Image: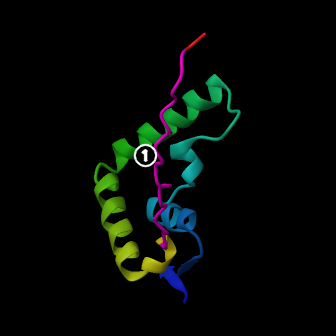
């Protein structure tokens, strides 16, 4: 199944987020190993984008909800089971 946002195909969850935001996901999440200066510049750019687009967070949530509803298989999650807790046998005896 193919999914599109606008005229662009989204293949992964990251693609959906990037197309919905109109910016690379790394702008919002950062990248491993970035310097303090790079982080500050990235955060400044993100603040500028949010200032210019105050409804962006609401739009992103709306688009994400729509994508999840239309493509539930993208988030096909298998619940993890917890192992049964076994009781430790009582120790009988005297401590030395």
How busy is the neighbourhood of tag 1: few (under 14 within 10 Å), some, or many (20 plus)? some
Q: Is residue 80 left or right of residue 34?
A: left
Q: Which residues are magenta?
A: 76-94
Q: Is residue 73 left or right of residue 58?
A: right
User: Vertical placement of 25 versus 64: above or below?
Assistant: above
Q: Which residue shows up at 56% across the image and 13% down it? A: 95
Task: Tell me residue 53's x, y (percent).
Answer: 34, 51
Outermost residue to the bottom? 1
53 drawn magenta: no
Element type at mark 1: helix
Q: x and y percent of residue 85 in the render? A: 46, 49
Q: Is residue 75 visible?
A: yes
Q: Residue at x 29, y 48 (%)?
A: 54
In the rendered picture of this protein, how many numbered marks are placed on residues? 1
44 or 80, which is in the foreground?
80
Instruction: Please state which of residues 21 and 73 is positioned toward the viewer in this rendering.
Output: 73
Residue 88 magenta: yes
Judge left or right: residue 37 versus residue 19: right
Instruction: State whether the magenta stretch is mostly helix, strand or loop.
Output: loop
Q: Relative to 59, does residue 49 appear above or below in the rendering?
A: above
| Residue topped by disc 1 | 49
Residue 6 visible? The answer is no
Quadrant occupied by the C terminus: top right
Which residue is rendered at x = 34% and y = 54% of the image?
Answer: 56
């Amino acid at each position: 199944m193919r999914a599109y946002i606008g005229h662009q195909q989204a293949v992964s969850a990251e693609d959906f987020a990037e197309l919905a935001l109109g910016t690379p996901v790394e702008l919002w999440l950062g990248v491993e190993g970035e310097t303090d200066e790079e982080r500050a510049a990235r955060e400044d750019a993100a603040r500028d984008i949010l200032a210019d687009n105050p409804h962006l967070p609401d739009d992103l949530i709306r688009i994400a909800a729509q994508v999840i509803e239309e493509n539930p298989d993208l988030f096909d999650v298998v619940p993890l089971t917890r192992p049964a807790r076994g009781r430790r046998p009582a120790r009988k005896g005297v401590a030395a």
